[in-house]
Amino acid sequence: MIGEGYRADVDNSTSAAQNCTGSPPTTRATCMKSLALFMTLGVSLEGWKKGGWLRRELALYEEHARNGVRIFLVSYGGDEDLKIARDFAELTVLINEYRLPKRLYSALLPYLHFQRLKGVDLIKTNQLMGAKQAVTAARILGVPVVVRQGYSHVEFKAQAKGIGSRRYRQAIAYERTWLRKADLCQYTTENAKAGAVERLGADNCKHVVIPNYVVDRLWEPTFHNFREVKANDTFRLGFWGRLAKQKNLENVVAACSRLNVELVLAGEGSERRAIEQRAQSMRVGIKFLGQIPHEKLTRSMAECDAFIIASDLEGHPKSIIEAMFFGMPVIAVDSPGIKPFVVDGETAVVGQTSIASLRSTILRARGLSPEKRRMMASNARAFAQSAYSLKAVARRELEIYEQLLRRNDHDRIQKTQRAV
């Protein structure tokens, strides 16, 4: 069955939390009344807005707020973040109000916001980077802390810098220190969890999987032209995300040479110039949209024949889930982080990351009938809806946090009784 193994992994994360806490999951927040999210080290709401991720990133916490949980966001931004927060009345944003230098603010952050966070039930990080500040604050406040890894920081450093490099050793040390101090470690995939558990030699009960989500209302299926692509027609491939080396877009460009393909890329990143130069040298049609509002993104992608993702490594790529929700045919590669989402011929056309394989994969997708592309897009949407809708993921997260708080209360009572 399509995606069955991956859905089982996701469901097991809740079971693991239940086994560790000794009580069944709840259906809504009960004892958790407030949560403080510590944003990734150095990141602000303004940065999320410029990147086009603001509403997507905040949607989970808006959903938690609708379930009765008061949400605090601890940001590294300044006054501009307060202006942005006016559109999110349910959320309380704490900023660098004293306009301190970034390094000093990061060091003092747990103490600067102590009074505002007094009484909060749980602290959570958005990513591993920033865990030091969150764990310190949690210890001062006497509350549990959840350290989340949306992607494997260690594995990304290994790929970028090499195993044995100074940066890799630093990443290992940081992960080991702060995951061990967390009350709960949260990952977006089973593979990321397994890697961390192996590196740490840690108790599996402390580690859970809660996947990324899609804001359903932002990705309602629109009209896609499942046309028959004739020999002289331009085949349009869409992509959105960071234009980074890891995304393997230079190989995508090379694979499109002499295929009458146009690439439509939304996003920014360090590799934009290299991608552009390669497209020019190989005479591949390419259109850069930059960072654009969601409404413009969906309009542009609705005009494409397929979405393509060819990354060498992904954590838990939101873009492929969004493309599936959006009802787009998907061209993908069988690489870590992408493999669990795709079944060749059922939810996507799947190849490898090399230029030759990408070329043959694109040709296969181009040659599919409109009916076949429509069928795969429908299968992919059904798979994505089954596990990655906002409400389903928010409910799962609250259930697991409820278990953590109950376990924490139980441990505190036991310690008090032993002391007496």
Image (cartoon, helix red, strand yellow):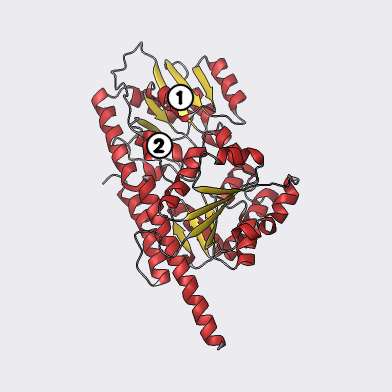
Q: Farthest top residue? A: 232
Mark 2 lies on residue: 322
Tell me which amino acid carries mark 2. Answer: Glu
- Residue 387 numbered mark, or none: none
Q: CA distance from mark 1 to mark 2?
A: 15 Å
Q: Is residue 151 visible?
A: no
Q: Residues within 10 Å of mark 1 (few under 14, many from 20)?
A: few
Residue 149 coordinates in the image, percent (x, y): 53, 52
For the C terminus, give its image quadrant: bottom right
Residue 251 coordinates in the image, percent (x, y): 51, 28
Q: Farthest left residue? A: 371
Query: 313 above or below 18?
Result: above
Q: Nearer the viewer, residue 61 or 57?
A: 61
Helix, strand or loop at label 1? It is helix
- 312 on left or right of 103: left
Residue 113 coordinates in the image, percent (x, y): 65, 56
Mark 1 lies on residue: 296
Are the residues at dot 1 and dot 2 in contact (C-beta closer than 8 Å)?
Answer: no
Q: Residues within 10 Å of mark 2 (few under 14, many from 20)?
A: many
**Which is more foreground, mark 1 or mark 2?**
1
Query: 322 above or below 166?
Result: above
Helix, strand or loop at label 2? It is helix
- 216 on left or right of 346: right
Q: Is residue 225 visible?
A: yes
**Could you tell me which residue is drawn at 36 percent across and 23 percent down?**
305
Going from the N terminus, do you reach mark 1 or mark 2 first? 1
Q: Nearer the viewer, residue 190 or 242?
A: 242
